[in-house]
Amino acid sequence: MSRRIEPDLELAASLFAALAAATRRGRGIVRDSYGAGEQAAHDIVRSAASSRGLEIRVDALGNLFMTLPGRKRDAPRIIMGSHLDSVPQGGNYDGAAGVVAGVCALTAMRAAGIVPDCDLAVMAIRAEESAWFDIAYLGSAGAFGLLDPQCLSIGRSDNGQSLEATLQQCGFDPCPIRERRPLMDPAHIRAYLELHIEQGPTLVARGLPAAVVSGIRGCKRFRNARCLGEYAHSGAVGRAYRHDAVAATVAFLHHMDGIWRQHEEAGEDLVLTSGELYTDAAMHGPSKIAGETRFVLDIRGLADGIMEAVAAEARAAAARLSGEYRVRIDLGATSDSPAAVMDRRLRSRLLELLETPFEMASGAGHDAAVFAKTGVPSAMIFVRNENGSHNPDEAMSLEDFGVGTRALLRLLLDFPF
Amino acid sequence: MSRRIEPDLELAASLFAALAAATRRGRGIVRDSYGAGEQAAHDIVRSAASSRGLEIRVDALGNLFMTLPGRKRDAPRIIMGSHLDSVPQGGNYDGAAGVVAGVCALTAMRAAGIVPDCDLAVMAIRAEESAWFDIAYLGSAGAFGLLDPQCLSIGRSDNGQSLEATLQQCGFDPCPIRERRPLMDPAHIRAYLELHIEQGPTLVARGLPAAVVSGIRGCKRFRNARCLGEYAHSGAVGRAYRHDAVAATVAFLHHMDGIWRQHEEAGEDLVLTSGELYTDAAMHGPSKIAGETRFVLDIRGLADGIMEAVAAEARAAAARLSGEYRVRIDLGATSDSPAAVMDRRLRSRLLELLETPFEMASGAGHDAAVFAKTGVPSAMIFVRNENGSHNPDEAMSLEDFGVGTRALLRLLLDFPF
């Protein structure tokens, strides 16, 4: 196949502009899952794809497929895409970039008259952001029949309407979720490819336009950890008689920071974070020893075994420091999402397609993790983005988007490599 | 003088019972400063002292003096006492024990027909607890003309009424505060003696009924410390790019715990506490790196120089760790109250009067610190107390109270030793 074909970046620019214009609310972007904002984004992308000759289909859960038909229509297809919803007051690129990239790649192939080996479909996935329904990967996990039917009763965070009622109101069908009925067969998907803005600062810091994602970090999170001590007068109680919840918590978290350093020095992929930590505002005081803290310990990495080992070390340290500080550090249960390693063959081919090959882990979750979990060979391209994501200041240049989209298009043209 | 005289513990028991009956509100004791609860306590004690022949006088700020006249009425007098107010929902003994002890000692001397060398006065001090007017040692500092006149506009924490209006409503006179006019001359006070329940667990743990106080710890407090970092995604940002306010704060506070250990090992009197520590509930999240913490660092000890050194170490560590963690740890200013060392002669005489001599620092502040600050030779006796103070569960046995009060009485009988 020809290497001269280029993604249509003018189309990309007009789509990003139309998306921002339709879904900006004040400073930020609001594409509420199964709401007016998300639907507006679907309408814009669908119209552009349809007018450029891609086949349109919407599944029972509202996921939108825009397909360039292949020679063998019943052969396993290649899906690319991402989500079109956003967090409240989010940015214009988180999610949308992957859908726009797919559309720009397929419309370029269509315009060049290329008929691929198998169907190539852009999937605009519904409701990836858990900010609205507190479910991770609602659209993609629902399409694979992986959701717990109880999720249908979850209310939307802003208006309280249940997922079931919301789906029905949009004209979609909650039955597949209730019956755990898959709408797609992983065996019939040859690959899943997702372009996404990087949500951290790595590519900006390294001066690189794009990267290949090695894997999506899993998460093992002590969501409701606490330390129980005893309130007492800060001046009147010596160390030997203290049950100081802050001192014990600080010792614990600093110890875990050291554990993280050890794993880093061993070259393992890992990040540890305590993003919530607080004494009880109703009980604490400047001249009191704290009797209680609550905190989160968030463990993420590419290897489930390493995360297990860190959680075990956390439990051991909690027990040891509880004794040392005469408190009870109760970490509670973890909520777990396993790591998803991206397909080795797709990764190495994508790396060859980048001018400066660079591979990095994704710390945030993505729909690609759901596809990988079902056994679909999956890959992701990260595009440089300033100011992080999930905020109005997301900033991706069209040039960098072009670098990532070009790699996506080349990979499609190379199939089967 | 005779050693046969014993403090009247039956009177003590009846006074404690009357105080509890008159000022219990629900589970706890409420003797609100310059309010109905404190006044009820003053009335009970005054009536008992008056009916047993002690002279009664009330100063312009409402401090109550109950005096056993001495042979030389114009010679410097000995004052003993404590405060009669309590924190909201406090216990029956914090403060009151010292006033009752003085009354029981003087009424016993009076009953035995003893005429001391100089006047011996029990001072029931007003408004020691800053819970009501947010002023430390209001009654005693006011009596020495040490208060900032601006304090007259401070509102009471429960009803908002200014100190000035409250004093006037009680029939007292705000003028001495406005004019910084002392009501007592330190040069005319031979000694100040204060019995108080221990507010920590040391005497319970050591199985001792009473102790002599070596000094009252000063306090150097970073009340409004904070650490400013940057909020970011917990999974997507590696250590090198983080500005993690929790990680830096935890490293700082754990370092300061180590500094405390070093001073302890050197035998220095010191306690360090961070009793308030919190991320911003409006901004933090389980999958976010924290961009801000706020915390308190409370440094207490008997030597102002050591507290200075620890505060300097805190500032140095804050600067160093701010660089290491790419955050800004801003400790802010300290609020300081200097340490008050108790009089060496009085302490050694009191130690001789205890069956098991034991000396310890007071971590909490007491009116004795004000007397010591003016140059009056001051001493304190701690009485064993369970469950800490400032709560409804304060528990002091009459036996232990008797041990402390007997030492007080013996000291009075020994004067001049």
Image: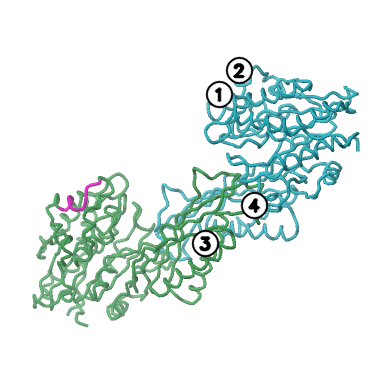
Chain colours: A cyan, B green
Residue B165 versus residue B403 in the image, above or below:
above
Q: Position of residue A138 (x, y in %)?
A: 67, 30
Along the polypeptide, which appears first: circle 4 or circle 2? Answer: 2
Horizontal side, residue A117 vs residue A265: left or right: right
Labels 4 and 2 positioned on one and the same chain:
yes
Circles 2, 1 touching at the beta carbon (< 8 Å): yes
Q: Quadrant of residue A112?
A: top right
Horizontal side, residue B129 vs residue B325: left or right: left
Tell which of B30 and A2 is nearer to you: A2
Q: Which residue is mark 4?
A: A272
Name the subunit of mark 4: A
Tell which of B278 and B320 is nearer to you: B320
Circles 1, 4 touching at the beta carbon (< 8 Å): no
Helix, strand or loop status at disc 1: loop
Q: Position of residue B198 (x, y in %)?
A: 35, 64
Residue A169: assigned label: 2
Labels 3 and 2 positioned on one and the same chain:
no
The Cα atoms of the two marked residues, 1 and 3, are separated by: 45 Å
Q: Which residue is mark 3?
A: B253
Q: Quadrant of residue A335?
A: top right
Q: Position of residue B64 (x, y in %)?
A: 15, 61
The Cα atoms of the two marked residues, 4 and 2, are separated by: 41 Å
Horizontal side, residue A316 vs residue B284: left or right: right
Helix, strand or loop status at disc 4: strand
